[in-house]
Amino acid sequence: MQDSHSGPSIDPRARRRAIVSSVIGNGLEWFDFGIFSSFSLIISRLMFPPQDGVAMSLVAFASFGIAFIVRPVGGVLLGMYADRAGRKAALSAIILMMSGGTLLIGLTPSYASIGIAASVLIVGARMLQGFSAGGEFASATAMLLEYSPAGRRNLIGSFQACSQALSFALGGAVAYLLLHSLEPAALHSWGWRLPFLFGALIGPIGYYIRLRVDESPEFSALLTHRRSVRHERLSLASIVGRYPRELLGTLGIVAVCTTSSYVGLIYIPLFASGQLGLDAGAGQLGMLAGALVLLVTCPLTGMLADRFGRRRVMVPAMIAYGVLVWPLLGALVNTPSTANLIRFELVSAALMSFFWGPSAAALAEAFPVQIRSTGMAIVYNLGALCFGGLAPLINAWLTRMTGDRLAPAWYIAVSVVIGTVGVLAMTQPEAQSHEAQQHV
């Protein structure tokens, strides 16, 4: 589903500024959201009533996943706001909300100090982060794609994946440094708060960066059209009724991308340190290794998709990922070691990059500009809830109930099937490009 539409004429400097600000702002946003995963076990011990080891892991994964429950609500509301007020206005508000939630996590006293109020504040902060994150992907991706030149939308869209990978890498690096630089008592007392306070402080920087960016040219053209012609304002129900294939197809793509992220990059390192006996620092090294591979390879796969088409790039990699996850995870479970964990992350990330890189453009091109943020917000956050945010909790529960430590491989395999169907549904012959998007 390549795009041959050239779109409005764009000043190259404005394009570079928009791309850089979207990538940096998006990376800061996901750093704030993602660092919770690195310290979720510590936070759960400090902020919730005492539990035994396995139960504490479930509490940690639940506190991580609570943000995903509110993400669809935040995504739809902020997506509709972005489709009416503009990408710039939405992105500026989103990063301030994320910073507020991050600051609250960093400043909340422990359960030992204020009792159940600590648990309530942490849950509230995670919900604020989730509400904010719900609108981030859709609005940032819309901005990126609407500034992209013809024939390079997969490449430019891949920077969205790069910014998320960068946030994972930064989070993993910060966690690893703290784990190896501080004594356990210091880490549990105040050290874990440092990345949250840092993340809250850099939020205003992202806000400033986003304020300096012009509104996307496609949305500006839409606003001009709205002023001159009476237009139909689509409701959420009418969007669902009018674009069912687009919603279901892109939901499949989101399913495999979020599963690979939250199971492969987040859950497996925590599983290795919490259940397989590896050092906590090994888990952070694994996450860092995988994130760095994604950071380097996603632009390459975006270029390949621009040249050869998304089907040829995404589908073989998905199938290979679904097959190879079994021996990779089996080796880690049977012989737990830092080397096997890093090997799992490196191979997984290399394969993930082939469907991560082109995914943002695939989602954005599925919807016309006037509902682009809303449409993407629906599928991305619903998929992230069902297959991503709750995946660590579901996999921990499945492993505990079945006793099968390869349960995550089953989970990933199911997502691969769903994702493959989604790609086949949404990628059309290359001659059919932007035409469908012009219909409202």
Image: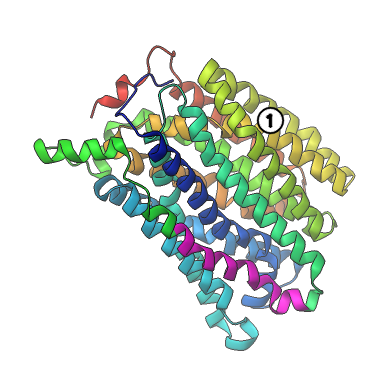
Residue 64 placed where, x, y %?
Answer: 58, 60
The image shows residue 392 at horizontal and vertical percentages of 64, 52
Number of numbered markers: 1
Report if residue 198 lies within the magenta region. Answer: yes
Q: Quadrant of residue 374?
A: top left
Q: Residues within 10 Å of mark 1 (few under 14, many from 20)?
A: many
Residue 372 coordinates in the image, percent (x, y): 33, 38
Is 298 displayed left or right of 379 in the figure?
right
Front-most of residues 120 and 141: 141
**Residue sitting at x 74%, y 45%:** 289
| Residue 131 seen in the current view | no
Q: Residue at x 66, y 62 (%)?
A: 58
Task: State which region is magenta.
Answer: 186-206
Residue 22 in the image: above or below residue 199: above
Q: Is residue 336 visible?
A: yes
Q: How is the image coloured?
A: rainbow
Which quadrant is the C terminus positioned in?
top left
Q: Residue furthest bottom?
A: 113
Foreground pick, 263 / 221: 221
Residue pictured at 85% horizontal, 49% vertical:
338
The residue type indicated by label 1 comes to: Tyr
Q: Which residue is mark 1?
A: 321
The question of residue 296 being in magenta is answered with no
Q: Nearer the viewer, residue 380 or 22?
A: 22
- In which quarter of the view is residue 434 placed? top left
Q: Secondary structure at mark 1?
A: helix
Magenta: main secondary structure:
helix
Residue at image x 31%, y 31%? 243
Quadrant position of residue 56 = bottom right
Q: Is residue 129 left or right of residue 397?
A: left
